[in-house]
Image: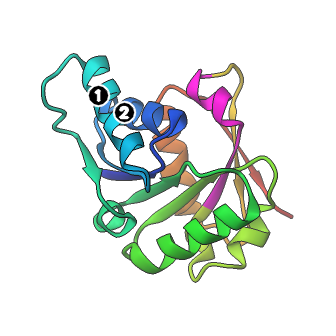
Amino acid sequence: MPLTVAIIGAGPLGRWLALSAARAGYRVQLEDVMPGNLHHAREEIRWQLNAETIPSVTFAASIEDAVREADLAVDCVPDELESKLEILWLLDRMAPPRTIFATPTTRLEIDDLAACVYRPDKLIAIAAEPQSLACGAAGPLLLRAAKATSAETIAVVEHFWTSLGFATAVEACS
């Protein structure tokens, strides 16, 4: 089980994911380029956990701070090619070599994204719309592995999502 999860983007999906991961026992680093999003996330998570302090969630000021100790990084940026390429480029250069990247996308091919990173074996797609993730939609969560995605990456990401209450299915690119 990854000990530290970096979540990039504190919009509705990022806030839900940070809260769910914290409840599941993960240490969470939540980052957003918009300070207002982090403020709203802090208040919502504090209210949801009914706590003055949130010991398992840290609100990072930069992507570099968020991923410094991450075992798993999940981006919650828009599902657009430019946004995904930019965030994966940053994560690939700032995160430790052990860090696994999971990117929610229904529009982009994981093999195309994997071709743009230095560690394609550490990249996997979560084939779900953000709304369906945040409300725990029925049915298995589809994880789409690139040709280069390692078995370890698949296992870690499957374990993460199942610990959040999702059934998972894996689709390997051919």
Q: Nearer the viewer, residue 98 or 9?
A: 9
Q: Quadrant of residue 25?
A: top left
Residue at mark 1: 43
- Looking at numbered disc 1 in the image, what kind of residue is underneath it? Glu
Secondary structure, mark 1, is: helix
Q: Which residues are magenta?
A: 124-136
Residue sticking out furthest to the left: 52
Q: Nearer the viewer, residue 30 or 169?
A: 30
The residue shown at (50%, 25%) is 165
- Looking at numbered disc 2 in the image, what kind of residue is underneath it? His
Q: Are there few (<14), some (14-19), or many (20+) residues within 10 Å of tag 2?
A: some
Residue at mark 2: 40
Left or right: where 50 falls relative to 26: left
Left or right: where 58 falls relative to 12: left
Q: Are there few (<14), some (14-19), or many (20+) residues within 10 Å of tag 1?
A: few
Q: Is residue 131 magenta?
A: yes
Secondary structure, mark 2, is: helix
Left or right: where 134 falls relative to 80: left
